[in-house]
Image: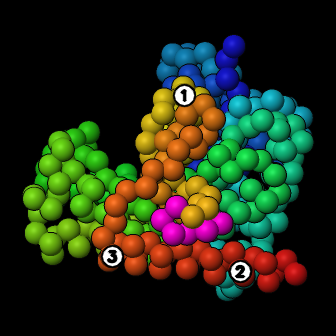
Amino acid sequence: MKKKATVVGAGNVGATAAMRLAEKELADVVLIDILDGVPAGKALDLAEAAPIEKHDSRILGITSDYSATKDSDIVIITAGIPRKPGMSRDDLLSTNMGIVRNVTEQIKKFSPNAILIIVSNPLDAMCHVAYDVSGFPKEKVIGMAGVLDSARFRTFIAMELDVSVENTHAFVLGGHGDTMVPLPRYSTVAGIPITELMSPEKIEALVQRTRNGGAEIVGLLKTGSAYYAPASAAVEMAEAILKDKKKILPCAALLQGEYGIHNLFIGVPVKLGADGVEEIIEITLTDEEKQALHKSADAVQKLVDDMKRLSS
């Protein structure tokens, strides 16, 4: 029986994720958005590409009526608004909290056994909203951040060393933002640590570029933000779950004591399979790396505290 995936939000990230899911034949896809006609138009366009791309996944685009998403195996939530000129951080947080809350209520109603992949920003905070509203087990609410940030780090390593990206592996932990924690000691090229291949100064430059990866693209585009790589990152997670691959990826998961962090979604290495987060993997960190991870956790905690304040 073919799997079913719902993508909430038919913007650039959501539509690209729908395309990747279909072209990999991972599932039949439902693309949903509040904008009348947009999800249906994009779904039809993607369906008409299927004979050329040679896949038989079905793609349905709908507006607001979640009944068509019933019994989804996986739901990728990309819905939300970007921060606009003149908008305060609290305004953005409050608006996206409301959007993710409403979406999650509908998903809970129609797909109570789904696994949720959260892409909406601020990502780590939105994981808390989805987790609290859904009441799902913590293993079934997962944030997409580390996969994207690690892919950016891998890209920059490959560019610097002029090697295939397929030879590169990298880990980026922590929250999705300026306080993320790239780990050069655990980042390799064909198994060789990059600390053996580059100077500390060059590595630090790549670390900083990774932290600024999203902002760099926003600066180049002028309007809008990255979507190809974020969509690919979410779909890599979905594939690991739908195919029960037991793949180890850095994702935002709810920690309950791991790494000394309690009741907080934060990016760490996890094993993804059919049950969602099947294991949180604790790697040994230096004192400096631990300090950086806890600083990142503090930034996420502040967002969570701000949401509580805005909700009261």
Q: Position of residue 158 (x, y in %)?
A: 21, 51
Q: What residue sits right under mark 2 in the picture?
A: 305
Could you say which disc has been placed on residue 244 in the image? 1
Which residues are drawn in magenta? 258-264
Looking at the image, residue 227 lies above or below residue 279: below
Query: In the picture provided, is 61 more to the left or to the right than 12?
Result: right
Mark closer to the chain start, 3 or 2: 3
Determine the residue positioned at 63% across, 81% down. Answer: 302
Mark closer to the chain start, 3 or 1: 1
Determine the residue positioned at 32% across, 77% down. Answer: 288
Looking at the image, residue 298 lies above or below residue 124: below
Mark closer to the chain start, 1 or 2: 1
Does any portion of residue 287 appear in the rendered image? yes
Q: What residue sits right under mark 3 in the picture?
A: 287
Q: CA distance from mark 1 to mark 2?
A: 35 Å
Instruction: Name which residue type carries label 2.
Output: Asp
